Image (cartoon, helix red, strand yellow):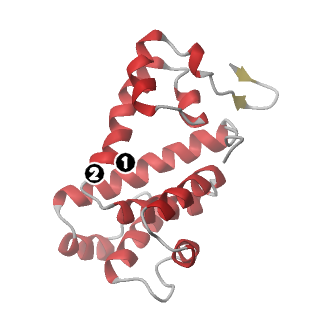
């Protein structure tokens, strides 16, 4: 339920999810609060979960590439929820804290490979101009496959949407996070 006074769209406890979402619950295990909010719209959740699973499980991007994009998008949007969750995911795939912190500085910070810098620049371009600048796109076309190019755009896009939902409806972080 939305609390009009606070603007919060409260997470729906998993035991109150629509029965059609049972396979989604089985897939997610313990859902995060963002999933509990999306579950308020069962048809949307059923569509979203396949897309989410592509981004986090079967994308043509490596885990590192994905996390660079997500962290930069979380930074650009000011989404502490996404940043905190993806710091944990980034550490889990072997990224060092200094590298994770450097994401906040962007592509111009010393130490990025050309590919890493392109990913960070793409996220910045999409946030600032809602498109990837021609010089960046041209360089990306030389560095990434068509599938990767599409996965880059969709990864930034989906996490921009998530940040918008999280911040607009004031989704609380999990107590144990």
25 shown above or below 66: above
Residue drawn at 80 percent across, 31 percent down: 6
- Residue 73 rendering spot, x and y as whole percentages: 51, 59
Residue in the image at 46% along x and 62% along y: 129
From this view, report whether residue 50 is shown above or below residue 41.
below
22 sits to left or right of 97: left
At x 50%, y 64%, the residue is 91
In the rendering, which numbered label is found on residue 56? 1
Judge from the rendering whether residue 70 lies leftward or rightward of residue 133; answer left or right: right
Residue 127 visible, this orientation:
no
Q: Secondary structure at mark 1?
A: helix
Res. 139 image quadrant: bottom left
Q: Is residue 174 visible?
A: yes
Which residue occupies the extreme bottom position in the image? 110
Which residue is identified by label 2? 59
Mark 2: few, some, or many residues within 10 Å (few <14, many ≥20)? many
Residue at 54% x, 16% y: name it.
17
Mark 2–mark 1 contact, CB under 8 Å?
yes
**Within the image, what quadrant is residue 34 found in?**
top right
Q: Which mark is residue 15?
A: none
Place of residue 130 in the rendered image (x, y in percent of width and height, measured from the top left): 43, 57
Q: Identify the element where label 2 is drawn.
A: loop
Where residue 111 appears, as percent x and y from the top left, is 45, 87
Q: As drawn, is 171 to the left or to the right of 144?
A: right
Q: Position of residue 138 (x, y in %)?
A: 24, 74
Q: Nearer the viewer, residue 131 or 84?
A: 84
Q: Is residue 73 above or below residue 30?
A: below
Label 1: few (<14), some or many (≥20) within 10 Å?
A: some
Q: Is residue 144 above or below residue 151?
A: below
Count of numbered labels shown in the rendering = 2
């Amino acid at each position: 339920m939305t609390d009009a006074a606070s603007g919060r769209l409260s997470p729906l406890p998993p035991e109150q999810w629509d029965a059609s979402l049972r396979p989604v619950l089985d897939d997610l295990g313990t859902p995060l609060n963002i999933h509990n909010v999306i579950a308020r719209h069962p048809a949307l959740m059923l569509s979203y979960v396949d897309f989410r699973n592509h981004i986090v499980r079967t994308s043509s991007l490596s885990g590192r590439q994905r996390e660079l994009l997500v962290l930069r998008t979380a930074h650009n949007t000011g989404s502490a929820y996404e940043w905190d969750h993806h710091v944990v995911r980034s550490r889990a795939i072997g990224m060092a804290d200094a590298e994770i912190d450097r994401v906040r500085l962007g592509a111009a910070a010393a130490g990025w490979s050309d590919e890493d810098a392109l990913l960070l620049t793409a996220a910045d371009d999409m946030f600032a101009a809602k498109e990837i600048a021609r010089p960046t796109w041209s360089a990306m076309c030389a560095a990434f496959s068509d599938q990767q190019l599409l996965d880059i755009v969709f990864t930034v896009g989906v996490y921009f949407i998530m940040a918008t939902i999280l911040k607009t409806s004031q989704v609380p972080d999990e107590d144990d996070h």
